[in-house]
Amino acid sequence: MSASTKLSTSVKALCFLAVNPLPKNSNEIADAIGINASKIRRLMAMLGKAGIVKSDTGMLGGFSLNKTPDKIHLQEIYCAIEDRKAFYLNVNKEKLNQSANSKKINNFFIKLFSDIQIEIENKMENITLKNILNHIK
């Protein structure tokens, strides 16, 4: 699952849990948002490790939010499900035969993309699940 798909699927699942406060199992979440239940279980495990959702066992068990929607930030969700930056640049820094101009261009893009990454993270830190819920009402 690509980063954008994982993020949007996670947000859809979390929105579903926010408007349905009783615990929901992975099949219920999957049916509600139209995704495979095994993918939901993988995402819920990652979100659970991050403390965003909790899981209750037993007949009435399932997943529920561990925080209120206004305390769950998009950046927190992203970091829970991804192990790389939102704006990833793979510049080969190890090529020994790079020309001086190639190195300068690589350094330019590394700095540029680093600055963009900071802007993305700041923007995502200021968007909460509650903001998203309000937007889709």
Image (spheres, rainbow, N blue to C red):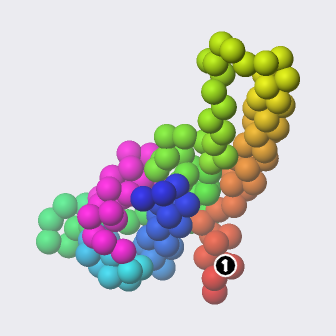
- Percent position (x, y) of residue 18? 48, 73
Main secondary structure found in the magenta portion = helix
Residue under the point 65% across and 62% down: 128
Q: Which residues are magenta?
A: 35-55
Residue under the point 68% across and 70% down: 131
Q: As shown in the figure, which amino acid type bears the numbered disc 1?
A: Asn
- Percent position (x, y) of residue 35? 36, 74
Please tell me whether residue 51 belongs to the stretch shown in magenta. yes
Up/down of 6 relative to 105, above or below:
below
Please tell me whether residue 80 belongs to the stretch shown in magenta. no
Up/down of 92 relative to 89, above or below:
above
| Residue placed under numbered mark 1 in the picture | 134
Q: In this rendered view, identify the residue nearer to me: 103 or 55.
A: 103
Residue under the point 67% across and 46% down: 87
Query: Circle 1 — which element?
Result: helix
Q: Is residue 18 visible?
A: no
Q: Is residue 1 visible?
A: yes
Q: Is residue 44 left or right of residue 124?
A: left
Q: How many marks?
A: 1
Residue under the point 47% across and 67% down: 9
